[in-house]
Image (spheres, grey):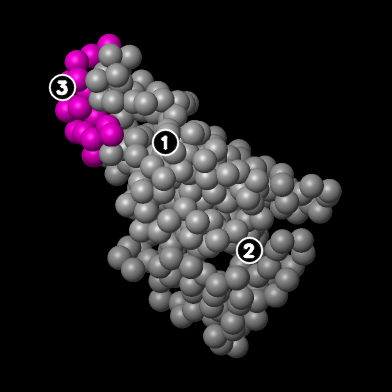
Amino acid sequence: MDAVAALLNGPRASGAFLLRSVLQAPWSMRIADEAPLTVLAVLRGSAWVLTGGRTEQLGAGAVALLRGPEPYTVADDPATAPQVAVGPGQVCTPLGAAVMAGLGTRTWGNDADGETTLLTGTYTAPGAVGERLVRALPALVVVPPDAGTAAVTALLAAEMARDAPGQDAVLDRLLDVALVSALRAWAAQPGTDAPGWYLAHGDPVVGPALRLVHDRPAEPWTVGSLAATVGVSRATLARRFTDLVGEPPMSYLTGWRIALAADLLADPALTVAGIARRVGYATPFALSTAFKRVTGVSPAVHRSAVG
């Protein structure tokens, strides 16, 4: 399993917020929903995204990934004052005389014939494994028009206009595909600030080691056993892994195991002992000790918070 697949395989969108916005200038929206991750695609026209430190224009076909919980503004022009504020729970508050209203299934805006159409998909809770991905991303990722991403967002937009049985599940899965497609397109750009674990996936030494960790977290891995399985010396793996990923192999393994455990704790049917065995700890006590050291809380406290 490669790095992106591993980080997205456990947590998936579930009841994600999806909206198509049809807008005629002037328009501006202040987004302060505190969502951990948002996918914003420009289907038609253009838009400006203003975060705390960057101002970027998105043309038709471009996609932006916005890491929360910091607020941001989306507008037809950086100088346009926000007309609506979107808070936690997607509660909208008008800020001026301009009117935003429902325009159909999962669609709103200020003009049904507006020149700009945006698609917004918001992950309300990506899960602990997904949080590792979110933390590794810049606050704003801009993906230029890409044929693969455009095909996925077009399909997502078409499905958003439907209201069929099981539609929420279909939309959640399509949002996941749109996110992965955008991530791949972004990481493939020269000079991108992609996470070390993503770039390391293609390395002939570190890539196989990462896949072993992701596929078999319950194995009693050591740097020596990982190195032997990959076919290099212990020193070579330790040095190369740390240089490319940004942390030593055992540190990465611990973080991965705890992230998996955090996700599994959301399932009340699983015991802490069973989860411990699945992620590589011999006893619930060993898992609890490592979990509290990494997250600051015990598995029981985490379970009550996500339950």
Q: Residue sitting at 46 percent across and 77 percent down?
A: 80
Which is more foreground, mark 2 or mark 3? Answer: 3
Question: Which residue bears the numbered disc 2?
Answer: 21
Residue 258 position, x and y percent, is 41, 44
- How far apart marks 1 and 2 lie (CA) works out to 47 Å
Residue at the limit of the structure toward the bottom, as seen here: 97
Earlier-in-chain disc, 2 versus 3 = 2
What mark, if any, has residue 281 been given in the picture? 1
Question: Which residue bears the numbered disc 3?
Answer: 235
Residue 111 position, x and y percent, is 68, 71
Q: Nearer the viewer, residue 183 or 220?
A: 220
Q: Quadrant of the image for the C terminus?
A: bottom right
Earlier-in-chain disc, 1 versus 2 = 2
Does residue 241 show up magenta in the picture? yes
What mark, if any, has residue 230 been given in the picture? none
Q: Nearer the viewer, residue 147 or 12?
A: 12
Q: Residue sitting at 32 percent across and 52 percent down?
A: 293
Q: Which residues are magenta?
A: 231-250
Does residue 279 show up magenta in the picture? no
